Image: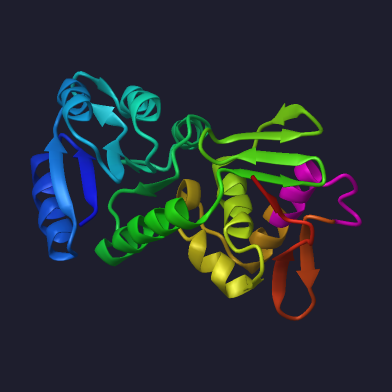
Amino acid sequence: MKKILLVEDDKAISKNLILLLKSEGFGVSHASTQKQAADMLIKNKFDMALVDISLPDGNGFVVCTEIKQTQNIPVIFLTASGDESSVVTGLNMGAHDYVTKPFRPRELVARIRAALRKTDSFPAIFDRNGLIVDIASGVVKKNGKEIFLSALEYRLLLIFIHNPTNIITRDRLLDELWDAAGEFVNNNTLTVYIKRLREKIEENPAKPQIILTVHGTGYRLGGGYVPE
């Protein structure tokens, strides 16, 4: 049984989440404050954590830092808004994903299972054409220099990293990005985000080597994937 640490101060949300997660076969330990979470991390080992950003005695960023210092597990942030800066901060601290409240139960469970699968199956470092992504810390570097991606750009990049051999359709990308940063992503804006991401990670965005276009279908990761 996978054990989840839930850090959430809203009683109603906590109650519903605990019932949902237990019904899906997960073990759940609940903390309503930053201090309670810290105590639980000392005494227990978990497989992943769901962490609310806003807590009565602090914030979820501190909890995420404590998790990364003590346990190598994925963290999904629960945020009450699509505030871009909060999301980016969380991802840059090494959070695996984030979900904006109110969230759909099935979507949350799918995100949890995906995070657990990726943790079990994928390496922590992606290295391709001078692009290095440290998935554990959320740090992205190009030719040795750190670059900064928006929350949506980072999630988009992770989709390709976690599907190194698959062609990813535009419809799938739209489904994956449905709530990123609270923004509505349609076919036109997806093209814009792909373009922006390429401008940051490719040597020559006009001739991409990392994110390749599969005409009439979608995109795929370029060859030369080197896990570490």
Which residue is drawn at the image coordinates 56% and 48% (left, top)?
Answer: 123
Furthest residue in direction front, as rendered: 228
Nearer to me, 174 or 204: 204
Q: Quadrant of residue 228?
A: top right
In the image: residue 111, left or right of residue 26:
right
Q: Position of residue 201 (x, y in %)?
A: 77, 44
Nearer to me, 120 or 11: 120
Q: Position of residue 209 (x, y in %)?
A: 84, 56
- Span colored in magenta: 194-208
Nearer to me, 117 or 16: 117
Picture layout, residue 176 above or below residue 18: below
Q: Is residue 205 magenta?
A: yes
Q: Position of residue 135 (x, y in %)?
A: 55, 41
In the image: residue 24, left or right of residue 186:
left
Picture layout, residue 220 above or below residue 53: below
Q: Is residue 10 magenta?
A: no
Nearer to me, 128 or 91: 128
Quadrant of the rendering where the N terminus is positioned: bottom left
Q: Position of residue 220 (x, y in %)?
A: 71, 67
How many numbered discs sit on the rendered protein? 0
Which residue is drawn at the image coordinates 25% and 41% (left, top)?
Answer: 46
Picture layout, residue 32 above or below residue 115: above
Picture layout, residue 32 above or below residue 103: above
